[in-house]
Amino acid sequence: MNKQEILEQLAKAVVEGDKNSARENAQAAVDEGLDPLEAVDRGLSKGMAVVGANFESGESFLPELLMAADSFNAAMEILNPLIEANKQKISKLGTALLATVKGDMHNIGKNIVATVLETNGFEVVDIGIDQSTLNIIEAAQKHKADFIGLSSVMTTTMPYQKEVIETLSEMGLREKFFVLVGGGPVTQKWADEIGADGYGETAVDAVGVAKKLLEKKG
Ligand code: B12
């Protein structure tokens, strides 16, 4: 199989919720020396976008979403060690506290952001899904985070990204942390509107944005 075929097969495996095929094609990607992040962005994530659209149009239902998520994660188990093997041997750049905001159970994207930040020299404290604003802020203080990364995959939970920023201000803590926002429906426009320090469309963007913010800080 060539590279393009592997990427297409990865997408197809997610669309069909076929765990075995997801594993086999992730292994093919590894064997053929594909960039694992390209396999995620141009393979698995492409499939997930189709799954989301089918769900929205009523063509598929929750079980299909679950099977797609399982297949995505099965492929990630094979790709993650390769992503981690590229880990840069650099001193710690900073600590990022990551969470999916309140009411939101989606974690696939956040987990990828965590892995990619880690492999690029950041220490990551991932407190998981459905995290209240106060939990997030407490954890950021406890772990002396430089960044707070907020994932929100549903339009209905995006307001909690805003709530975290507002609450930080009310508590007099806004200057202590850089706040990064991301997730499917999140845009640069939204990030600007709520006064976030940075937005990343993909996990790789998140690294670039975080590094730029550190440079600015000096
Ligand atoms: C898989 C999935 C699920 C799985 C989640 C499994 C899991 N462990 O995460 C399950 C089946 C559990 C699920 C449940 C539900 N889901 Co759902 N789900 C999806 C789906 C298909 C894919 C999401 C995903 O994983 N994408 C792949 C990852 C890699 O992409 P990503 O999350 O965007 O992340 C990337 C970037 O955004 C960025 N990023 C992400 N986070 C961050 C954070 C920072 C700081 C930065 C910088 C960057 C960044 O980097 C990532 C990698 O590049 C989406 C459709 C879609 N197009 O998003 C619907 C979707 C999000 N779900 C939806 C819905 C409605 C639901 C349910 C309510 C369904 C139901 N009736 O129960 C429940 C909600 C439960 C809850 N309260 O959260 C809707 C949301 C609609 C809306 N209001 O916005 C969507 C959009 C589907 C649709 N088109 O209708 N879901």
Image: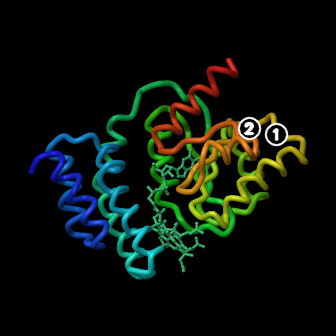
Q: Residue 6: image x %, image y %?
A: 18, 53
Q: Residue at x 37, y 56 (%)?
A: 45
Residue behind mark 1: 174
Q: Nearer the viewer, residue 62 or 142?
A: 62
Is 215 placed above or below 172 here? above
For label 1, being within 8 Å of ligand 1 is answered: no
Quadrant in which residue 200 is drawn: top right
Q: Tell me if label 2 and label 1 are in contact, CB under 8 Å.
A: yes
Name the residue: 60% across, 52% down: 186
Q: Is residue 113 left or right of residue 174?
A: left
Q: Residue 159: percent from the left, percent from the top?
A: 73, 59
Foreground of the two, 57 or 100: 57
The local crowd at label 1, few if under 14, some if 14 to 19, many if 20 or more residues have their Cα within 10 Å, is: some
Residue identified by numbered label 2: 177
Residue closest to the far top? 218
* Whole-percent x, y for residue 57 in the image: 45, 76
Q: Residue farthest to the front?
A: 57
Q: Quadrant of residue 73?
A: bottom left
How would you rate the neighbour count of disc 2 (Cα within 10 Å): few for under 14, some for 14-19, many for 20 or more?
many
Tell me the SS state at disc 1: helix
Q: Relative to residue 188, is residue 20 depicted above or below? A: below
User: Which amino acid, by three-letter code, is at mark 1?
Assistant: Arg
Q: On the rendered structure, is 124 left or right of 139? A: left
Residue 65 lies, with reference to residue 190, above or below; the image says below
Instruction: Name the residue nearer the viewer: 5 or 79.
Output: 5
Q: Position of residue 83 (x, y in %)?
A: 34, 42
Distance from label 2 to label 1 (Cα)? 6 Å
Q: Residue at x 78, y 48 (%)?
A: 165
Q: Secondary structure at mark 2?
A: loop
Q: Quadrant of the C terminus?
A: top right
